[in-house]
Amino acid sequence: MTRLKIEISVPESHAEVVIEALHAAGAGRVGEYARCSSVWKVTGSWQALPGAQPYDGEVGLVRHSEECRIESVCDADQARAVQRAVRDAHPYEEAVIHFLPLYEP
């Protein structure tokens, strides 16, 4: 079974809600441990383009803000459910959710 690393950028105000959604969808299992994740502060930047409805900032202006980066893991067959759950809980119009394959020798 292919395992995936999950990376999610989210405003700190919504980190716990997104983590709960992530784990409710089955992510975060490592051996005999559940709900495994890490959170660290990062600075995100973006520019909303015409037609966007940004959660934070204004169309046309470059915005910089502190965010949280949430990391966890899941099996490849859980990725769609995890993605759906995180998007439903995430405040951003375009949630940044990366799934990266893990090399496990």
Image (cartoon, rainbow, N blue to C red):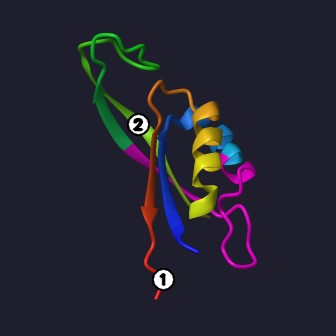
Instruction: Residue type at mark 1: give it.
Output: Glu
Rendered position, 8 above or below 50 = below
Q: Nearer the viewer, residue 45 or 80?
A: 80
* Residue 36 belongs to magenta span: yes
* Residue 60 belongs to magenta span: no
**Residue at the image point whose x is 53% and y is 72% from the top:** 2
**Residue 28 % position (x, y):** 65, 62
Q: Nearer the viewer, residue 74 or 56?
A: 74
Distance, label 1 to label 2, CA atoms, is: 32 Å
- Pointer 2 residue: 66
Badge 2 crowding class, 10 Å Cα cut-off, few under 14, some 14 to 19, many 20 or more, is some
Rendered position, 86 above or below 69 = above
**Residue 35 % position (x, y):** 71, 61
Callouts 1 and 2 close, C-beta under 8 Å = no
75 displayed left or right of 71: right
The quadrant holding residue 100 is bottom left
Question: For the view shown, which residue lies furthest in the bottom direction?
Answer: 105
**Residue at the image point whose x is 73% and y is 73% from the top:** 33
Q: Secondary structure at mark 1?
A: loop
Q: From the image, state whether disc 1 or disc 2 is nearer to you.
A: 1
Q: Secondary structure at mark 2?
A: strand
Label of residue 80 in the image: none
Rendered position, 87 above or below 32 = above
The quadrant holding residue 90 is top right
Report the span colored magenta. Answer: 22-42
Q: Nearer the viewer, residue 33 or 27?
A: 27
**Residue 39 % position (x, y):** 53, 54
- Pointer 1 residue: 104
**Residue 98 % position (x, y):** 43, 51
Q: Earlier in the sequence, mark 1 or mark 2?
A: 2
